[in-house]
Image: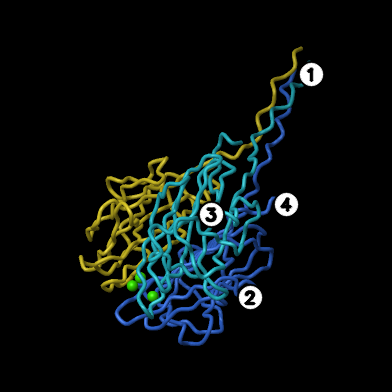
Chain colours: A cyan, B yellow, C blue
Amino acid sequence: GFPGAPGTKGESTYIQRSAFSMGLSTKTSLPNVPIRFTKAFYNEQRHYDDSTGKFRCVFKGLYQFSYHLTVYMKDVKVGLYRNNKPVMFTFDQFQTGNVDQASGSVLLHLDVGDEVWLQIYGDESFSGIYGDNLNDSTFSGILLYPDQDNL
Amino acid sequence: GFPGAPGTKGESTYIQRSAFSMGLSTKTSLPNVPIRFTKAFYNEQRHYDDSTGKFRCVFKGLYQFSYHLTVYMKDVKVGLYRNNKPVMFTFDQFQTGNVDQASGSVLLHLDVGDEVWLQIYGDESFSGIYGDNLNDSTFSGILLYPDQDNL
Amino acid sequence: GFPGAPGTKGESTYIQRSAFSMGLSTKTSLPNVPIRFTKAFYNEQRHYDDSTGKFRCVFKGLYQFSYHLTVYMKDVKVGLYRNNKPVMFTFDQFQTGNVDQASGSVLLHLDVGDEVWLQIYGDESFSGIYGDNLNDSTFSGILLYPDQDNL
Ligand SMILES: [Ca+2]
Ligand SMILES: [Ca+2]
Ligand SMILES: [Ca+2]
């Protein structure tokens, strides 16, 4: 008889990617609205919208979000929001002559369409996040584990 | 005769995942024992045990560990422990009216069964890590490179 | 008949890896030259050269760089350099009795041969980065998304 058919092809990993790394260009951050990070270190897929300040999930999976904030002139209280609900808070007090750094990171599983952003939590007295050409405040995110049923 | 049986399937990439992202629910952290982070942002595989405060390695490979601590009322000195030995230390002093943030991250190659946790290093005077509903202190870890001989 | 030939191999992800996680062994950091982190938490591929303080890109792709610095005795102003140009800055002021922590992280797409390092930005008065056996200052990097045309 004839040889059998060739075996089936092995599974491949279709590669899904989503990442952004943005910096603050402005010296002030308004309360009650998403903070807009407009300096792009990386935003290839444009899943971070610098006109709204929001990241929008295109690929379901586990993401890492990180932020590093320069605390200057005022205290800083910031919430990491997911769809209008703050899920994590970072608080750092300022004292004259003592610029500080405050940072946070978290892993979150997101569904398609979920939005994530940073926002001052409270009034203007908590809005001391600073950025200029020589002082960065940054916000980054990256898809680390795409859901397997995406593939 | 009949055709032979189909060939064997090609190699696939079997996907190994391990990640946790936890927050502190309590206002105080005891010295000399692992800090228990009991608020789960993500702990799907349950490799972080919130009853002991320890992460236990199930898949051999390279992990990233990160922590972000709110420093309040006391100084903070914390060690990142691997199997009863501190491998990295973070120190931040507190002054009245100046809540601070202290953070650390490291890449560690772990073997199956290795345990990793955070613990106050020193006496109670170094235990000023704070967490409540609106102030987070967090500890996260993720398997970034599973060892290739796992596959 | 005989069994068929084996199936073709699935597209496998040829695995490219590059990661380092280093700590400061020395109490002082000189301005105007790359900071040399000589304590290795992980440096398997040796893409970080602890004799120069520079990471050198071997695999094109998206990298995450993170640093966590102990601020002691002096202010700290540090630049993350890519090929002789600072791309990100972190500033933290020191006050007596108030050791601080300053951190930064960013995602950068690198080409083969690109070099990345940390360096004091400004004169010696900004060089207050501290490290010893029980106080860490660290610098880490990891290839998260190798370029697909590498494969
Ligand atoms: Ca400071
Ligand atoms: Ca502070
Ligand atoms: Ca401090």
Mark 3 sits on what residue?
Answer: A141
Camera-side mark, 1 or 2: 2
* Kind of residue at badge 4: Asp
Answer yes or no: do the residues labelled 1 and 4 have beta carbons within 8 Å? no
* Kind of residue at badge 2: Lys
Q: Please state, as top left, top right, bottom left or bottom right, where the N terminus of chain B lies in the image.
A: top right
Find the distance from the CA under tag 2 to the CA under tag 3: 24 Å
Find the distance from the CA under tag 3 to the CA under tag 1: 54 Å
Q: Chain of mark 4?
A: C
Mark closer to the chain start, 3 or 1: 1
Mark 2 sits on what residue?
Answer: C85
Mark 1 sits on what residue?
Answer: A2
| Rendering coords of residue C9 (x, y %) | 69, 36
Is residue B77 rendered to the left or right of residue B106? Answer: left
Query: In the image, which disc is placed on residue C149?
Result: 4
Mark closer to the chain start, 2 or 4: 2
Answer yes or no: do the residues labelled 2 and 3 have beta carbons within 8 Å? no
Q: Are marks 2 and 4 on the same chain?
A: yes
